[in-house]
Every structure is written in structure tokens, then in C-alpha cells.
């Protein structure tokens, strides 16, 4: 049974503070009594290793402490605190306690962003930015389900087909688990009829459809951030140079389709380690890919596909092949080749024509109803638009790039590309909203200037999604 300890140190307050700063992995929580501190076992061990004279006055079992950890609705999309951090915050609460007062500690988030009235605390030496605050006994704390009764009712409507649509955006794919957590925590997973994805959204979408917990998908993001995979999202300058020289002196018929980087094996490893024990998706999964040979958008799915039903060409494909095809960014990555019958089809990123799957799932729903495969009267699409703006990537703010004679043209072209992409998404959204039986709830990741192929931006992407998606969902609730 875990304990905390009340100890006595014959040191002044200033000397105790200096000791903590020098040790680095030592936390002393001062009480109102002079020379008395609450510490956890980690800090007690540290004092012993430093040979600092101290005396243990009391050992208190953590389970018996008059300290309650409370999780309000605002904290639910964030990583829950680890047990060692909870023990530490309970020791701190005991040091703040007055008389026989019961202490109530709210856990808010794991976030570098400052939250009003909160304090940051982790285990000794820990760098996890857990945010906490104290609240009075008897104060009402709202749960997640208390804040979203209308959304819950709409999603659970038996006459409505509900699907999730995860958009493309490179490493921004790790924003998607924030919505997945919301769905799971409200107990709405069983109401989701289909999961759709494009590019990075296909990667996250397949894992979620197969039952991988959203927290595990986020963890893969941190694994990439910490270089625990050999997966690279962008080619080196040398790879680009070699590729260009090869195209110049040894041209081939399909040199524009070769791609600079082959990430299929590494991406496959990251996905399959989660899917190896899951043979069947808990929710049907579909993704968008662009067929270069046929010059058209296609829907790839591990589900069975009926003949002569769908307008958009739809093919049954191995789940991993489908996701890799949807994620093969043109020019940067090697296209995915899939053999269907005796014909080899070459695919690139689904975001080429449909960054957020909207039109394809809508058309499928219409055709399913026409052929009596779906009796639902309404369609609800909960979509995540990551929209990685080309014009806001860090390259355009680099002084050397700005000195190039063609900089203005490059910048103008990037702005023009963003306008075209946004217009295409708006047109697809407008097509859906003109149908009174269709509802679209769109969440947008409000991040600009981050390199969508740089894993070092992943922590900020995850934390921004956790903050902003909750606010956007609250706005949707308020508008119902």
C-alpha cells in the first residue's frame, strides 16, 4: 500500500528550497509547522541518498488521506495523470490542509498552457505538465455527459446514421484522438456506423475502427516525437538532390511518380503492431485514395462491397494496403501499388481530391438507401478538418527563402493553392448542407505555421486539439 510521509528537517525554509533546486528530483511540501514537510517515497529515498539528516514523524496510507482527486468535464480529453503524480499532489494537498479540512483537488489537463488558478505538479524530477487546482467541499463539478445532453441525444437517434470523418494533414493526424476520446467517454461508440479517413486521417481512422484506444494512438505520436521509430515523414536534402539528378541523367517514363521517400514498411509496422490481435473492425472503415492510372478518386475498404451500387468506384482492399495508398503524398512518397485481378493500380494520397471525406460518404449513404441497404432517414457527419495551409509553413518565413527572386511567386502560388483547396472543401460542405436530411458538425484544428511533416510539432498538435475541440463541441451543443 502506497504511503506519504510527514518528516522533520532541521533546515531553514531557504535552505530547503536551495536543496530542492540543487537535487532536481526532490520535492519538499512545507506545512504550517516549522521544519515539517510532507514527502512521497521518491523524495524520502532521495534524502537518504544525499545523506540529509531527517526524522520520519508519520507514515500515512494514500488511500486513507482526506484528499479527493476530481476529474471535471474539461479534463476528459487530456491524458490522465499517472499514479506517481497523483501521490505527489496528495502530499502537497496535505501540506496545504488546515485543521480537519477535506481537500478536493481538480485535475484539469496535461498542458504547457497556463490555466487560471491552476498549479503545475508532477513527481520529483518529472516534466509532465499536469495542471491542478483546489476547490471547496460541496462545490458542484460538472461531468462530461452533463455538458452535452443535446449532442448525446442527436447521436443516439435511431433514425440517424452517424459517421466520423477524419481529414488529411500529415503528422496532424494525432489531433484526431481528441474527438475519438469524446465519443468513447460519452459512451457513443456503438452509435457510430462508419469511420472514414483520408491520408493521415485514414491511419488514425483505421486504428480507431479496429478498436485501438485513442490514448494509444496519441502515444504513437509521442513515440514518433521521441524518435522511437525509423519512420521519417520528409526526405533529406541529399535524397531530393539524388532523385533530381537521377531524373535528369537517367530519365524513366514514370519519374514524376517515383517519390522521394518510401515509408510504407515503417508505417505498416506502426499500424500492424496494434492490429495483429484485432481481426475484424468494430466499426466499418472506408478511406479515400487517388488512382493515378484511372485518374479518379476511389474508396478503398476492408468491408465487402456490393456490385453495381455505388457511384464512386469502391473496392475491397486489405486494410493496411488501403491506408498506405491513402497516405502516399504525391511526389514526396512512393505511390502504393495494388494488384487487382491482373491489373496493377497505382495510388497516391486521398487528400489530392478529398481532404476531408464528405462527398464520398454522402453518396454512399444515398445509394445505400436507394438500394434498401440502409433505412436511416438522416445522416450526421462529425468531421475533423486539419487543413494544413501551404502558405503558413515555416519555410516561407525563413530569411534565405525570402531573398530568392522567385519568393513572391512561390508565396503567391501557395496562397492560391490554399484558396483552391478551401473552395473545394466549402463546395463539398455546401453540397451536403443543401440536403435537409444531412447534418455536418465540423471541427477545425486552429494551428498555423507548423511543419505538417515534422514530428517535433506533434505535442503541440495533440494539446491544441484537446483544448480547441472541446470548445468547438461546446459551441455545437449551444447551437442545438
Image: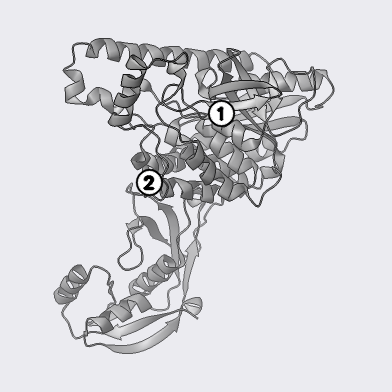
Q: Position of residue 224 (x, y in %)?
A: 41, 46
Q: Quadrant of residue 291?
A: top right
Q: Position of residue 189 (x, y in %)?
A: 67, 43
- Taking 246 as reference, is 92 above or below it? below
Q: Could you tell which of marks 2 and 1 lies nearer the N-terminus?
A: 2
Q: Is residue 212 visible to us here?
A: no
Looking at the picture, tell me which residue is in the foreground, 115 or 83: 83
Q: How many marks?
A: 2
- Taking 221 as reference, is 170 above or below it? above
For the point 54% across and 52% down, the residue is 142
For the point 32% across and 58% down, the residue is 127
- Taking 185 as reference, is 390 above or below it? above
Query: Which residue in the protein does label 1 denote?
Result: 325
Q: Position of residue 153 (x, y in %)?
A: 69, 38
For the point 66% across and 40% down, the residue is 152
As helix, strand or loop, the secondary structure at mark 1 comes to: helix
Q: Quadrant of residue 12?
A: bottom left
Q: Is residue 292 visible to us here?
A: yes
Q: Position of residue 83 (x, y in %)?
A: 46, 67
For the point 61% across and 21% down, the residue is 345
- Taking 234 as reference, is 207 above or below it? below
Looking at the picture, tell me which residue is in the foreground, 309 or 273: 273
Looking at the picture, tell me which residue is in the foreground, 259 or 31: 259
Side of 473 relative to 396 (left or right): right
As helix, strand or loop, the secondary structure at mark 2 comes to: helix
Measure how far apart labels 2 and 1 are at the Cα level.
24 Å
Side of 55 relative to 334 (left or right): left
* Residue, far front: 250
Q: Quadrant of residue 479?
A: top right
Mark 1 closeness class: few <14, some 14–19, many ≥20 residues within 10 Å: many
Query: Which residue in the protein does label 2 denote?
Result: 225
Q: Are marks 2 and 1 in contact (CB under 8 Å)?
A: no
Amino acid at each position: 500500500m502506497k504511503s506519504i510521509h510527514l518528516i522533520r528537517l532541521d533546515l531553514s525554509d531557504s535552505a530547503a528550497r536551495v536543496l530542492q533546486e540543487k537535487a532536481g528530483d526532490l520535492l519538499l511540501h512545507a506545512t504550517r509547522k516549522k521544519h515539517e514537510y510532507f514527502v512521497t517515497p521518491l523524495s524520502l529515498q532521495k534524502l537518504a541518498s544525499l545523506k540529509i539528516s531527517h526524522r520520519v514523524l508519520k507514515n500515512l496510507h494514500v488511500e486513507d488521506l482526506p484528499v479527493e482527486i476530481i476529474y471535471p468535464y474539461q479534463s476528459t480529453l487530456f491524458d490522465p495523470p499517472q499514479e506517481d503524480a497523483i501521490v505527489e499532489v496528495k502530499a502537497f494537498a496535505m501540506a496545504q490542509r488546515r485543521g480537519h479540512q477535506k481537500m478536493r483537488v481538480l485535475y484539469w489537463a496535461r498542458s504547457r498552457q497556463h490555466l487560471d488558478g491552476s498549479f503545475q505538479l508532477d513527481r520529483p524530477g518529472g516534466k509532465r505538465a499536469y495542471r491542478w487546482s483546489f476547490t471547496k467541499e460541496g462545490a458542484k463539478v460538472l461531468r462530461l455527459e452533463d455538458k452535452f445532453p443535446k449532442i448525446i441525444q442527436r447521436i443516439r437517434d435511431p433514425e440517424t446514421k452517424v459517421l466520423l470523418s477524419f481529414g488529411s494533414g500529415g503528422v496532424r493526424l494525432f489531433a484526431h484522438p481528441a474527438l475519438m476520446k469524446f465519443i468513447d467517454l460519452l459512451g457513443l461508440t456503438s452509435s457510430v456506423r462508419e469511420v472514414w479517413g483520408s491520408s493521415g486521417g485514414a491511419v488514425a481512422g483505421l486504428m480507431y475502427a479496429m478498436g485501438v484506444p485513442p490514448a494509444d494512438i496519441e502515444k504513437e505520436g509521442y513515440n514518433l516525437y521521441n524518435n522511437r521509430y525509423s519512420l521519417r515523414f520528409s526526405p533529406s536534402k541529399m535524397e531530393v538532390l539524388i532523385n533530381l539528378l537521377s531524373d535528369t541523367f537517367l530519365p524513366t517514363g514514370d519519374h514524376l511518380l517515383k517519390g522521394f521517400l518510401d515509408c510504407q514498411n515503417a508505417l505498416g509496422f506502426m499500424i500492424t503492431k496494434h492490429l495483429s490481435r484485432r481481426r475484424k473492425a468494430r466499426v466499418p472503415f472506408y478511406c479515400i485514395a487517388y488512382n493515378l492510372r484511372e485518374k479518379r478518386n476511389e474508396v478503398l475498404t476492408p468491408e465487402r462491397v456490393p456490385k453495381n451500387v455505388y457511384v464512386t468506384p469502391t473496392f475491397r482492399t486489405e486494410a493496411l494496403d488501403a491506408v498506405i495508398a491513402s497516405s502516399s503524398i504525391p511526389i514526396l512518397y512512393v505511390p502504393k501499388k495494388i494488384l487487382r485481378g491482373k491489373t496493377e493500380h497505382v495510388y497516391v494520397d486521398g487528400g489530392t481530391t478529398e481532404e476531408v471525406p464528405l462527398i464520398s460518404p454522402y453518396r454512399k449513404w444515398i445509394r445505400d438507401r436507394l438500394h434498401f441497404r440502409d433505412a436511416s432517414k438522416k445522416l450526421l457527419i462529425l468531421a475533423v478538418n486539419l487543413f494544413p495551409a501551404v502558405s503558413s509553413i515555416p519555410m516561407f518565413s525563413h530569411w534565405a527563402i525570402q531573398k530568392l527572386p522567385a519568393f513572391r511567386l512561390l508565396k503567391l502560388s501557395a496562397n492560391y493553392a490554399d484558396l483552391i483547396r478551401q473552395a473545394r472543401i466549402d463546395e463539398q460542405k455546401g453540397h451536403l448542407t443543401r440536403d435537409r436530411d444531412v447534418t455536418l458538425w465540423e471541427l477545425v484544428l486552429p494551428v498555423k505555421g507548423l511543419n505538417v511533416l515534422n514530428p517535433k510539432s506533434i505535442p503541440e498538435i495533440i494539446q491544441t486539439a484537446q483544448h480547441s475541440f472541446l470548445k468547438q463541441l461546446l459551441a455545437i451543443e449551444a447551437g442545438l
